[in-house]
Image (cartoon, rainbow, N blue to C red):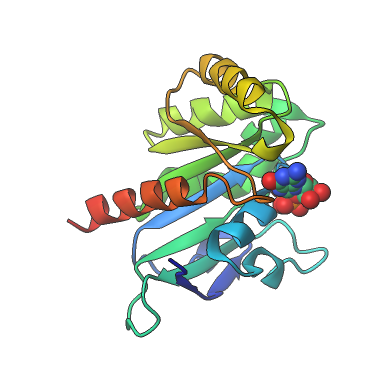
Amino acid sequence: MKPHVEFLTSAAAAEQFPSPGPPEVAFIGRSNVGKSSLLNSLVGSRIAHVSSTPGRTRTINFFPVRWGPKQPAPDLLLVDLPGYGYARLSREVSEGWGKFIDPYLMERKTLALCVVLVDVNVPPQASDRSLLEFLRRAEREFIVVATKSDKLSANQLRSKLRQLSDAYQTEAIMCYSAKTGAGRDELWKRIRETVVARSE
Ligand code: GDP
């Protein structure tokens, strides 16, 4: 299955969010987690690259997706949120990064699912934990996707996923490799289920 994906708009402030339409699936994670690679691998083209103008990285980018190219209205929007840094950890999530992202995560009525990306090769992080707590408080549906799974053996991967699942207190965790495409079908399936449930 290769969905039809376009670029809609970049928003640098809440006033620039597109008017609410189909269900939205947002991708969030620390810088370098592999978010652009995952998005490009998921849709089979370089969408994350489309809007990454240097110096304008802190924007929310919206990508309409149609299951079939001839459909007049998109089935969903993929939403690429800015990555947060390593240095300031949870403060960044709650302050600078949060100031811009909060209105989206807290108030966006059409936000159906948050896909939180964590690098499976990196130990559990305080900043990621803060983000998940924030999403729980906001009563947002989320899944954790462990990226770069190709770097580990099947055994290592299993134990890492268990460790992350314990640390983040969630069973909603899956893995992905942008390099091999592992996890792609499973992630699309999860996205589709959310979109279908929302449209019913
Ligand atoms: P972003 O900052 O979160 O958008 O991360 P990028 O997609 O730019 O990836 C950051 C780095 O991780 C790059 O060097 C990628 O080549 C690498 N990377 C991303 N995804 C994978 C993956 O699935 N497997 C491996 N081995 N490397 C990856």
**Is the N terminus in the top left, top right, bottom left or bottom right quadrant?**
bottom left
- How many numbered marks have been drawn onto this rendered protein structure? 0
Q: Quarter-wise, where is residue 122 in the image? A: top right
Q: Hey, which residue is sitting farthest left in the picture? A: 200
Quadrant housing residue 69:
bottom left
In the image, taking residue 180 as reference, residue 170 lies left or right, namely left
Q: Is residue 112 visible?
A: no
Q: Position of residue 7 (x, y in %)?
A: 56, 74
Q: Nearer the viewer, residue 10 or 107?
A: 10
Please state if 70 lies on the left or on the right of 102 as rendered: left
Q: Position of residue 125 (x, y in %)?
A: 68, 23
- The quadrant of the image that shows the C terminus is bottom left
Q: Position of residue 127 (x, y in %)?
A: 66, 27
Seen at 35% across and 85% down, the residue is 70
- Please name whichever residue, 26 or 196, is drawn nearer the observer in this view of the structure: 196
Residue drawn at the location 55% of the way across and 49% of the way down: 27
Residue drawn at the location 67% of the way across and 43% of the way down? 97
